[in-house]
Amino acid sequence: MVHKFTVATHSRTELIDITAQIQRLVTENNVQSGICQIFIPHTTAGITINENADPSVVHDILMEINKVIPFNDNYHHLEGNSAAHIKSSLFGPSLSVIIENGQLLLGTWQGIYFCEFDGPRHRKVWVKIIEDK
Ligand code: ZN
């Protein structure tokens, strides 16, 4: 079974903490131990894990990624969102997190972020939970 939920983004580029939504799926399915695979089915979005204590970290990540990959740079792709496609490939479409004692096994300062690079839009997140038996 694949669990699906949507994320509403509000800016052209934005990192949204989805840790709570993922943990809720783990809790609702009563999974004590296993692996949680998270997949983003989009070519202009991605996923990453980074600090969720100081919001300045997310601000700085976006500020720098938008400098390194500018929105306009004589790209060939006619849709006009090449920067978003490039950022999507840099961050990647998926990650997996260990589940132990019913909790996502993350570092103290880590959160799971949906990465919007061509918003605002409504986006999909797919989650597969593989339980240890
Ligand atoms: Zn495109």
Image (cartoon, grey):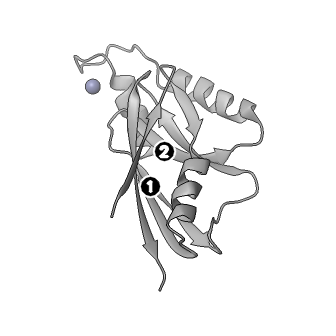
Which of the two residues, 45 or 17, is positioned nearer the viewer here? 17
Residue that lies at the very extreme toward the bottom in this rendered image: 133
x and y, in percent, of residue 7 in the image: 46, 36
Of helix, strand and loop, which one carries label 1?
strand
Which of the two residues, 44 or 131, is positioned nearer the viewer here? 131
Which of the two residues, 27 or 64, is positioned nearer the viewer here? 27
x and y, in percent, of residue 21 in the image: 55, 49
Q: Which mark is residue 47?
A: 2
**In the figure, residue 14 lies in which quadrant?**
top right
Q: Is residue 42 above or below residue 71?
A: below
Amino acid type of disc 1?
Ile
Does residue 83 appear left or right of residue 80 in this picture?
right
Residue at x 34%, y 59% (from the top left corner): 2
Mark 2 or mark 1, which has the lower sequence index?
Answer: 1
The N terminus sits in image quarter: bottom left
Amino acid type of disc 2?
Ile
Residue at x 56%, y 69% (from the top left corner): 98
Residue at x 48%, y 64% (from the top left corner): 36
Of helix, strand and loop, which one carries label 2?
strand
Does residue 14 appear left or right of residue 85 in this picture?
right
Q: Which mark is residue 72?
A: none
Does residue 1 appear left or right of residue 63 in this picture?
left
x and y, in percent, of residue 62 in the image: 59, 28
Q: CA distance from mark 2 to mark 1?
A: 8 Å
**In the figure, residue 38 lies in which quadrant?**
bottom left
Q: Which mark is residue 38?
A: 1
Which of the two residues, 125 or 53, is positioned nearer the viewer here? 125
Q: Quadrant of ligand 1?
A: top left
**In the figure, residue 33 lies in which quadrant?**
bottom right
Q: Is residue 50 above or below residue 118?
A: below
Q: Is mark 1 within 8 Å of ligand 1?
A: no
* Marks 2 and 1 in Cβ contact (< 8 Å): yes
